[in-house]
Structure formats: structure tokens, C-alpha cells
Image (cartoon, rainbow, N blue to C red):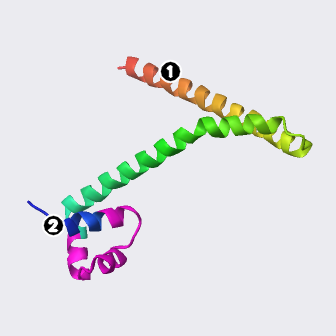
Amino acid sequence: MARSGKFEELAALVASGRTVKKAAGQLKLTERTAYRWNRQPEFRELVKRLRVEMATRALGMITGSMAKAARKLRSLIDSPDSKLARRAARDVLELHHQMNAQSELEERIQALEKQAKRKP
């Protein structure tokens, strides 16, 4: 079924966090139409897909900044301000600990999943 551009625009606004009522007002749609579309499975699926796309883009932006953040934290360890250097060092150690704990949990989960698959 062909949809108007307003259908997709409403879905994009709802996916980005606007209420149906506010999004309808912004698009000069009647609330009745907006809420009717909002009840349709096709609309809900579009909103869901758009949210996943938005989250994926945001994660990509964060991931792209991780190396820069790590370099900054590493440079702060050498700060002449001893309090700042200590906090940076503590943050590095804490992040290292968290990453090791996460890795260990992932390994344990994989081992349990492998074990569960072997049992009939």
C-alpha cells in the first residue's frame, strides 16, 4: 500500500521520541489520523526500524570517539596536576577491570552455552 510522505515523517518523529500528539501538530495532521496510523502494525514496524537505525548511527558515532577518548585519558595521566593525573589513572584502571570482567563473563557464558548444547 502506498503511503504519503507524512506517514514516514510521523514515524520518524515518533521514533525520535516525540509524542504522537506533538508530532501530528508539527506535521499539521489531525490527531485522529496520527493515532489511527500509530495503531497500524506497518507504522509500528517502521517506527521500530527507524529507532534501530538511529541507535546504530549513534553507536557508530560513539565508537568513532572511543580512540580519541582513550588518548585523552592517557594524556591526562601525565598531567602536572597530581589530582587530575590520579583520577585519570584510576579511571584507566577501573575501565581495564570492567573490560576484563566483561570478557570473563562472555567466556563463561559461551562455555555454558556450549555445555548446554551437548546435553540432550
Numbered mark located on residue 111 in the image: 1
Q: Residue at x 47, y 42 (%)?
A: 60
Q: Main secondary structure of the magenta part?
A: helix
Q: Quadrant of residue 103?
A: top right
Residue beneath the point at 34% across and 66% down? 14
> Mark 1 falls on what kind of element?
helix
Please tell me whether residue 9 is drawn above or below residue 32 in the rendered image. Answer: above
Secondary structure beneath disc 2?
loop
* 75 within the magenta span: no
Which residue is the site of mark 2? 4
Left or right: residue 57 compared with residue 67: left
Give the percent coordinates (x, y) of residue 85. Answer: 85, 40
The quarter of the displayed image where residue 98 is located? top right
Magenta region, residue range: 12-37
Left or right of 22 on screen, residue 94: right
Neighbour class for label 1 at 10 Å: few (<14), some, many (≥20)? few
Which residue sits furthest left? 1
Q: CA distance from mark 2 to mark 1?
A: 50 Å
